Amino acid sequence: MKLARREFLHLAAGAAAMPAVLRVAKAQTYPTRPITVIVPYAAGGATDVLGRVLAERMRGSLGHAIIIENVSGADGSIGAGRAARAKLDGYTIGLGSVSTHVLNGALYSLQYDVLDVFAPILLLGASPYVLYTRKTMPANDLRELITWLKANPNKASAGFGSGGLHLVTAFFRQQTRAQFTLVPYRAGVTLMQDLVAGQIDLAFNTSDQLPLMRAGSVKAYAVTSEMRLVLAPEIPAFAEIGLPALSFSAWVALFAPKGTPKDIIGTLNAAAEEALADPAVRSRLTDLGFEIFSREQQTPEALAAMQTADAAKWWPIIKELGIKAE
């Protein structure tokens, strides 16, 4: 049976439009099953807890569970690498940080380019570092601490864990021209235990360790944020004491593998943005020491710009200081 020309053209046009229709239908139905978020650190840390709080809230928006998978090792580069190699369907994404998605590109010989293999989704929060010391440190403020370190060259020791902590500790040593030993740790928990016990003299760490200061177990001298912390307004920023270069933001963000469809990125961004607007989520993240980014910064473009800016700032410093992965 022959088809009329008009009917034939109508059917042909419909067939040609089918792929587009299918793409739209696919976007409208994503997700149809649980999503896995790879956290490149061990369970129990502040970043892991942030991921779990976020996942629970995003579940309500997406209609499906979000499963946290901890893949630790090599300062998070193993987990980040696995997330980079995931299928481009939005069902495996990664929770990343300035360490995993910027600094590791200069610290390790990776099989992937941290600035090229990921599709940014959203900036979640940032946790500035605090300079802590053992409770018996005789200095009363940062200036006195620097003076003490210079008066006792190579007699003090500073612990560090992640690549970010290593960088800031070495940079602090360079900026102050103090001489002290750097001691690597595999876990931040062990580092702080040794600081409390007086086995090491100082250490940078995140603001979720402030309860140790309030308990009198350690001292705190300065923060790497541009302004004082809301949680501890009594602690000055390094910039106030003449060390503005010691400004560092340990941000955390969501990433998908590069090539993930933009509509899926948009769906994930919207769900995460909604979660961050929830007062209960914001309160929990604040308790963990995170400062939440403004709505204007919660875009894929803002996250990409943050990555690029941090690489431009810190990669040359890593090279200058000769910092290597421990």
Image (tube, rainbow, N blue to C red):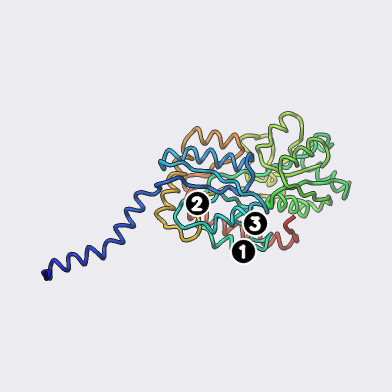
Q: Amino acid at mark 3?
A: Leu
Q: Quadrant of the C terminus?
A: bottom right
Q: Position of residue 240 (x, y in %)?
A: 69, 44
Q: Quadrant of the N terminus?
A: bottom left
Q: Position of residue 164 (x, y in %)?
A: 68, 51
Left or right: 282 in relation to 173: left
Q: Amino acid at mark 2?
A: Thr
Q: Position of residue 168 (x, y in %)?
A: 71, 51
Q: Which residue is mark 1?
A: 111
Are the residues at dot 1 and dot 3 in contact (C-beta closer than 8 Å)?
A: no
Q: Is residue 94 above or below residue 10?
A: above
Decide which of 120, 134 is in the foreground and name it.
120
Identify the element where label 2 is drawn. strand
Q: Earlier in the sequence, mark 1 or mark 3?
A: 3
For label 3, count other residues whose C-alpha is less than 10 Å away and answer few (under 14), some (14-19) or many (20+): many
Q: On the image, which quarter does residue 190 sit in?
A: top right
Left or right: 161 in relation to 44: right
Q: Is residue 196 above or below residue 38?
A: above
Q: Which residue is mark 2?
A: 92
